[in-house]
């Protein structure tokens, strides 16, 4: 599936990565209910249009393993705590989606059968084929891997046509546009350009995994209402990352 100005093809199945920070809204910590509701409404609109949707949620609004490791905590232990934070966020998003009338399943890479299904690839695919939104929680289930890598992995496993990363800004810039008013936004990039320029959009493992599977990545501002549906149509500002040729 390739989004172009000449005429975007409608994806059959898409994965949206939502960072934990995106769920904070304007707060400094935790989950902002209005922000979650707005994101859920955007996801619901896409799901109701007939596109199969799955999500990966981060946990940085609650706990970040790398930060904890810098303060002396064991890195693996910190990453496991971060995985549990993603489950909390997944349940919040699930609740908001179900209030929108969207059937939803949370699948966790760490078994916790009382609140989420265990991640089983074929079961996840079947859920989406039945019109359910699947939320993947607990990252990959392994320490030292980010939720960005989990998003690329799940998108490849689900045979998604596209991976979308909702961020705080409307694409990939050469520097932080919130600090540098002259920052340049890229319209398109290749995977190798992202890696060679050390652009801070997704970690190297996630970019490499997407490159190996020829999985296009769209980076857009998740805080603009309706942006998820617009970028799937090829409208609005965003950055597209994919192989050329």
Image (cartoon, rainbow, N blue to C red):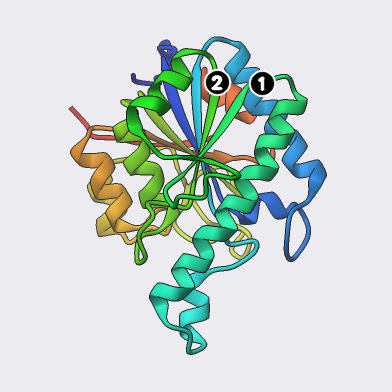
Question: Residue 38, percent across and down?
Answer: 75, 34
Question: Residue 66, percent across and down?
Answer: 46, 74
Compared with residue 32, is residue 28 higher up or lower down, i.e. above or below? below
Residue at 42% x, 82% y is 74
Compared with residue 232, is residue 207 higher up or lower down, i.e. above or below? below
Question: Residue 136, percent across and down?
Answer: 48, 41
Distance in Å between CA atoms under marks 2 and 1 = 7 Å
Q: Residues within 10 Å of mark 1 (few under 14, many from 20)?
A: many
Q: Is residue 2 visible?
A: yes
Q: Is residue 225 visible?
A: no
Q: For mark 2, give the secondary structure.
A: loop
Task: State the quadrant of the N terminus.
Answer: top left
Compared with residue 24, is residue 212 higher up or lower down, i.e. above or below? above
Residue at 53% x, 14% y is 131
Name which of mark 2 and mark 1 comes first in the sequence. Answer: 1
Number of callouts in the render? 2
Name the residue carrying label 1.
Answer: 102
Residue at 52% x, 79% y is 68
Name the residue carrying label 2.
Answer: 132
């Amino acid at each position: 599936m390739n989004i172009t100005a000449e005429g975007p093809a409608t994806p059959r199945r898409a994965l949206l990565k939502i960072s934990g920070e995106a769920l904070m809204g304007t707060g400094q910590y935790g989950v902002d209910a209005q922000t979650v509701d707005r994101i859920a409404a955007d996801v619901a609109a896409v799901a109701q249009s007939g596109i199969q949707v799955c999500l990966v949620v981060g946990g940085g609004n609650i706990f970040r393993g790398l930060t904890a490791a810098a303060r002396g905590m064991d890195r693996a232990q910190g990453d496991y705590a971060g995985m549990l934070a993603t489950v909390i966020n997944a349940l919040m998003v699930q609740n908001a989606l179900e209030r929108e009338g969207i059937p939803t399943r949370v699948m966790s890479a760490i078994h916790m059968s009382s609140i989420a299904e265990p991640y089983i690839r074929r079961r996840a695919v079947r859920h989406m084929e039945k019109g359910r939104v699947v939320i993947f929680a607990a990252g990959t289930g392994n320490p030292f891997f980010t939720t960005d890598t989990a998003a690329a992995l799940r998108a490849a496993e689900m045979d998604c046509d596209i991976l979308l990363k909702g961020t705080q800004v409307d694409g990939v810039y050469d520097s932080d546009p919130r600090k540098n008013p002259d920052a340049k936004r890229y319209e398109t990039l290749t995977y190798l350009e992202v890696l060679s320029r050390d652009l801070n959009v997704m970690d190297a493992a996630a970019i490499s995994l997407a490159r190996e599977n020829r999985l296009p990545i769209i980076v857009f501002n998740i805080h603009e209402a309706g942006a998820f549906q617009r970028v799937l149509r090829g409208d609005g500002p965003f950055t597209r990352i994919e192989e050329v040729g």
